Each structure stands twice: as structure tokens, then as C-alpha cells.
Image (cartoon, helix red, strand yellow):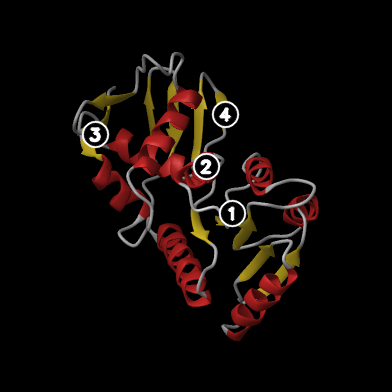
Amino acid sequence: MAVKVLVVDDEKLIVKGIEFSLKQDDMEVDTAFDGQDALDMIKTNKYDIILLDLMLPSLNGFEVCQAVREFSEVPIIMLTAKGDDMNKILGLEYGADDYITKPFNILEVKARIKAILRRNHNHSVKQEDSSVLSTGKLKVDRSGRRTFIDSNEINLTAKEFDLLELLMTNPEKVYSREELLNIVWGSDYPGDVRTVDVHVRRLREKIEEKPSSPNYIHTKWGVGYFFKN
């Protein structure tokens, strides 16, 4: 089946250019020009990946990304004309999987899309251990990719779940931030180790009673992170 992509940007020439190029690779492309329309389309259609501009009418890219993460793990690549690190980190913090700074080369866009889709495909065909991991109030259903605290389901993004699963299946093993970046995001991921810090902080906020004094995900200062049963 063809890969289905949603391209969201208020600059119609950019949208048309991306749409034309992706269709050359036999992808199916929908387009939206403001944040609210994009959110409505995502709620009613199934997409394999979303290209989402930061500066949009109605709802900005951060707001759309945050809303989507309430109900979907669809991969999101943020498009931003702002090259400063804060916008990149904010995009990841709101649940984006990757970012591309404008102006960009369409070949780079297609390479990023294919890299994310390849990682997701490899993950989906991989034989999963169906066992449930649990410690204290925390329970992780690996086959169903669901996480619970005291029987209450916690909504994790795909990367948050992958990170928690890796640490939890290797308790007491200290992973450096570089190792976690390579294992969870892949060696071809263009971001830096701050991506790991952002996701660890978000994980702690979701699974720890006191994120500042965690029970599960601990920091080995100067080294990295580890999970403690």
C-alpha cells in the first residue's frame, strides 16, 4: 500500500512542491494550510507520517502536535523557519519525532521520511516478547505497548515507550545518552543527546510520583540513565 502523508504549511508553494515530489515516489499526499484543518484531518484519516509547519494560522504546529499526541502516535516531522535550538527542543517536547529547518532540500525531507518509516516498519515486524514487565505501581505491557500506574493507563508517545521498555528490560544497566540516542532513535537520527534528556524528563513526569526524586528512572551523574526496580 502507498505511504500516506499529510503536509501542513500555510505557504502554498512549499506545499505544492513537497506534494509533487512525494507523489513522484508514489506516496499518497493530503494537504492542509492551517492548524485546525490539519487536526480535523488527522482525527478522521489514517496517515503514515505528518510534515507539520511550526508557524500556522488557527493552531500553531506545537499546539497541533500536542493535540495529536493525545490520541495518536503517528510520526510527526516539524518544519520550522526558526533555527534556534529552543524551537527544536520544544518541538520534541511536544511529541515530534524529528525536525527540519527551512530552507530545506526536498531530498533531505524524503530521506527523513523514509528513515522514520523504515524504523517503524522494523519495529512492527520485530518479534515482541509478550510478557508484562512490572515493578511497584508501574506495569508495562510490551505486546500491547501500553503502560499503567496502579491500573490507570498512562499515555506515552512511541519514543517514550521505547525508551522506558529498553531501560526496564535492562534494570541497573547504565546507558549513556549517546547509547540511548542510537538505540531508540537510530544512528541516522540528526538530533543530539538533549533529545534523550527531554524524553526522560517527560517520562518522569508521567510515571513518577515525584519526578524530581524518581523511583524508577535514575541519573548516573556524568554517565547517563538507568532503571531501578
Q: How far across and down, in percent of the image, does residue 170 sit?
A: 25, 36
Q: Nearer the viewer, residue 185 or 162?
A: 185
Spatial CA distance of label 1 from label 4 is 19 Å
Spatial CA distance of label 2 from label 1 is 9 Å
| Element on which disc 3 rests | strand
Query: Residue 117, relative to residue 134: is it above or below?
Result: below
Query: Residue 187, relative to residue 152: is it above or below?
Result: below
Query: Residue 102, relative to residue 78: is it above or below?
Result: below
Q: Which residue corresponds to mark 2? A: 157
| Element on which disc 4 rests | strand
Q: Which residue corresponds to mark 4? A: 153
Query: Of discs 3 and 2, which sits in the foreground?
Result: 3
Spatial CA distance of label 4 from label 3 is 27 Å
Hey, what amino acid is under mark 2? Answer: Thr
Q: Earlier in the sequence, mark 3 or mark 1?
A: 1
Q: Quadrant of residue 71?
A: top right
Give left or right: position of 217 versus 18: left
Give the number of the disc on residue 224: 3
Query: Of discs 4 and 3, which sits in the foreground?
Result: 3
Q: Earlier in the sequence, mark 2 or mark 1?
A: 1
| Element on which disc 2 rests | loop
Query: Residue 84, relative to residue 151: is it above or below?
Result: below
Query: Of discs 3 and 1, which sits in the foreground?
Result: 3
Hey, what amino acid is under mark 3? Answer: Gly
